[in-house]
Image (tube, rainbow, N blue to C red):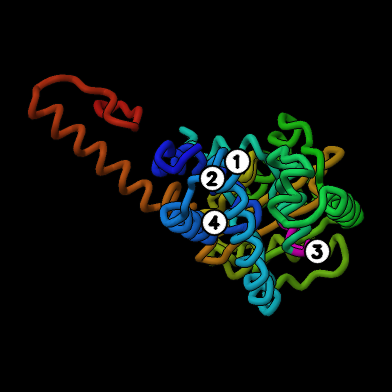
């Protein structure tokens, strides 16, 4: 395909969702992923593409290489964080965008995303490309500038390490998982400590981006309860019910999780891993930077936008003296 035959803007836009999904799986951050994809666009815009036959392959290669370079720097920064680091949760939209659909086709659980942090950048790239994007070893070899045999070995080594670390490579039954997470949500809202502890396995794993002082399984569960409630401003678990945590279910990386809210704003996101009818792992995300996207789409700013849209619909309806019950993207009965 000649450069004259490539509509660069259209070719990039057609591949953009795939590129964002790949960069996010590599970096664990929406903002970092979007920065990388922006850099890819600049390179694509300036590149001589006369020899490019498959634009998506060229763009995928550049995205993977830039993400590897970015990850090398990020890992140094993340390793220095005293409180630890968790990937930014990717929350599924009610009306999925192209990026959400691309992510779903390349699904990896949040727990697996966390364990990917333990891989070297090249290992992570090879694993993500092979397992999430169905790239064959010849294609991965071109991207990483290795031999296909070497890439096969890299992927095998990454799989072995992840399995040794207990990676949740298989998702649990979604119905059973959702039912257990709903029980957790209800126990949080009613401040049912006994109910909470009954949901946890004897070897509960707790990971947080704030320090959690817990060593033994039962102590870990109790400590997590106190930590979770303190995240939303409660001094003790027996705080006044008027200030109790409000918990909502939402989809995190394709699985049901929980958002903890304080005064209508998201204070924490909880990713939940289940197995055998019990909760085996909790991952608590509280960093403001990682909650920014969630708050924008589901927190107070989203509510303000929704109310503004409703008010606009009402003004429009009154001006036209017609009964309008649906406005734009918001299926809201404005007469209710």
CB-based contact (under 8 Å), mark 4 and mark 1: no
User: Is residue 96 among the parts visible in the rendering?
Assistant: yes
Tell me how far mark 2 sits from mark 3, CA to CA. 58 Å
Secondary structure of the residue carrying tag 4 is helix
CB-based contact (under 8 Å), mark 3 and mark 1: no
Question: Who is closer to the viewer here, 66 or 159?
Answer: 66
Measured as percent of width and height from the top left, residue 34 is found at 49, 55
Tell me how far mark 1 sits from mark 2, CA to CA. 30 Å
CB-based contact (under 8 Å), mark 2 and mark 3: no
Looking at the image, residue 282 lies above or below residue 118: above
Q: Residue 51 carries which label?
A: 2
Measured as percent of width and height from the top left, residue 196 is found at 74, 50
Quadrant where the C terminus is found in the figure? top left
Measured as percent of width and height from the top left, residue 25 is found at 64, 51
Task: From the image, tell me which residue sits under label 3.
Answer: 220
* Residue 115 located within the stretch drawn in magenta: yes
- Provide the residue span drawn in magenta: 114-120
Tell me how far mark 3 sits from mark 1, CA to CA. 32 Å
Question: Who is closer to the viewer here, 167 or 259?
Answer: 167
User: Is residue 292 among the parts visible in the rendering?
Assistant: no
Residue located at (21% from left, 32% from top): 313
Badge 4 or badge 2: first in the primary sequence: 4
Task: From the image, tell me which residue sits under label 1.
Answer: 103
Looking at the image, residue 230 lies above or below residue 176: below
Badge 2 or badge 3: first in the primary sequence: 2
Q: Comparing marks 3 and 4, which lies closer to the viewer?
A: 4
Q: Does residue 286 appear to the left or right of 300 in the view shown?
A: right
């Amino acid at each position: 395909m000649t450069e004259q035959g490539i509509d660069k803007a259209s070719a990039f836009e057609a591949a953009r969702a795939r590129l964002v999904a790949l960069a996010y799986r590599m970096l664990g951050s929406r903002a970092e992923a979007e920065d990388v994809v922006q850099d890819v666009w600049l390179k694509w815009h300036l590149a001589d593409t006369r020899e490019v036959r498959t634009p998506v392959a060229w763009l995928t290669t550049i995205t993977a290489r830039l993400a590897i370079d970015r990850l090398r720097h990020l890992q140094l920064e993340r390793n220095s964080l005293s409180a630890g680091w968790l990937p930014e949760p990717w929350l599924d939209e009610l009306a999925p965008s192209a990026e959400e659909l691309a992510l779903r086709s390349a699904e990896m659980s949040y727990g697996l995303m966390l364990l990917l942090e333990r891989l070297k950048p090249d290992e992570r790239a090879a694993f993500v490309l092979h397992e999430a994007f169905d790239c064959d070893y010849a294609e991965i070899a071109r991207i990483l500038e290795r031999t296909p045999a070497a890439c096969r070995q890299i992927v095998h080594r990454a799989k072995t390490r992840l399995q040794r670390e207990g990676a949740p490579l298989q998702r649990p039954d979604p119905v059973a998982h959702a039912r257990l997470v709903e029980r957790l949500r209800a126990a949080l809202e009613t401040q049912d400590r006994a109910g909470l502890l009954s949901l946890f396995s004897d070897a509960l794993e707790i990971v947080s981006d704030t320090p959690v002082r817990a060593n033994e399984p039962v102590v870990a569960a109790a400590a997590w309860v106190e930590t979770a409630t303190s995240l939303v401003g409660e001094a003790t678990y027996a705080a006044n019910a008027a200030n109790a945590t409000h918990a909502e279910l939402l989809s995190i990386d394709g699985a049901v999780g929980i958002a903890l809210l304080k005064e209508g704003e998201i204070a924490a996101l909880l990713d939940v891993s289940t197995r055998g009818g019990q909760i085996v792992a909790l991952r608590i995300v509280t960093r403001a930077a990682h909650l920014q996207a969630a708050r924008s789409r589901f927190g107070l700013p989203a509510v303000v936008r929704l109310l503004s849209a409703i008010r606009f619909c009402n003004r429009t309806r009154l001006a036209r003296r017609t009964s309008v019950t649906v406005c734009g993207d918001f299926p809201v009965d404005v007469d209710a």
